[in-house]
Image (tube, rainbow, N blue to C red):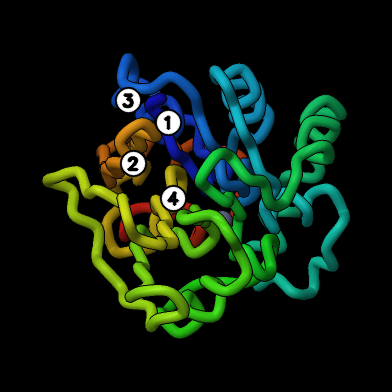
Amino acid sequence: MRVLIISDIHANQVALETVLADAAGGYDVVWFLGDLIGYGPNPNECVEIVRALPGLVALVGNHDKAVLGEIDLSVFNGDARAAITWTQDTVTPATLDYLRALPARVQAGDYTLAHGSPRQPVWEYILDRFVAQDNFAVFTTPYCLVGHTHMPVLYRQAGPHGEAFEEAPDYKSARSLRGERVIINPGSVGQPRDNNPEAAYAVLDTATDLWEFRRVPYDLFATQSRMRAAHLPERLAARLGFGW
Ligand code: ZN
């Protein structure tokens, strides 16, 4: 089974449609790792697109929960908070109902899926190998997929209970995961933060456990102009151009 792995769309419809077009024909089902909305200009449209994807497994993210009113907005920075408030004024009841039903952590075959981390599915950021190492102890499958940091990365564990090591994404060739324990982040579709503005996603073949990191440029000016027309914070529009 070929799985399209997407995360952190953040209401960026142009990036989402570009990823789906780029991956078209190359996947059977879709796993989405959370944060469908927040930051971007098209929350309802993105929910409609994602919920119609084939074989979808979808998670809730911290921004989704904030829009639902399930997280205190004081934990977000000013721009993120402004975008969440804007999104709350924009989303339809159908969008809210859909997000409210999403789980925070699921297991799909050999893969544990969580937005932030298996230990704290909604909030924890796995930003280094030490946090990754702690998290290897709290899932039992060989593999774990996370989002939330918006940075593509792979952590592998050296032997049972061993140290965790970090690997940068290789966009040129697929990587076999067989025989290893790994935590992988595919990066963000709608707001990359690794200084590369191209939309990030991944494709996984569960028959062979081959993983491919991918990037695709999208019309970020289109997303920026929609954000400016919606009077979302200018800094949130500008950052898309820097990939941060
Ligand atoms: Zn996010």
Q: Nearer the viewer, mark 2 or mark 4?
A: 2
Element class at badge 1: strand
Q: Mark 4 belongs to which amino acid?
A: Ser
Residue at screen point 60% across, 63% down: 139
Residue receiving disc 1: 3
Q: Nearer the viewer, mark 1 or mark 4?
A: 1
Res 229 quadrant in image? top right
Q: Which of marks 1 and 3 is nearer the N terminus?
A: 1
- Disc 4 CB within 8 Å of nearest ligand 1 atom: yes
Element class at badge 3: helix
Q: Is residue 77 toward the left or the right of residue 206 in the image?
A: right
Rendering coords of residue 114 (x, y %): 61, 54
Residue receiving disc 3: 23
Q: Can residue 191 be seen in this view?
A: yes
For label 4, the crowd category at 10 Å Cα-Cα, with few meaning under 14, some 14 to 19 and many 20 or more, is many
Q: Mark 2 belongs to which amino acid?
A: Asp
Q: Which of marks 2 and 4 is nearer the N terminus?
A: 4
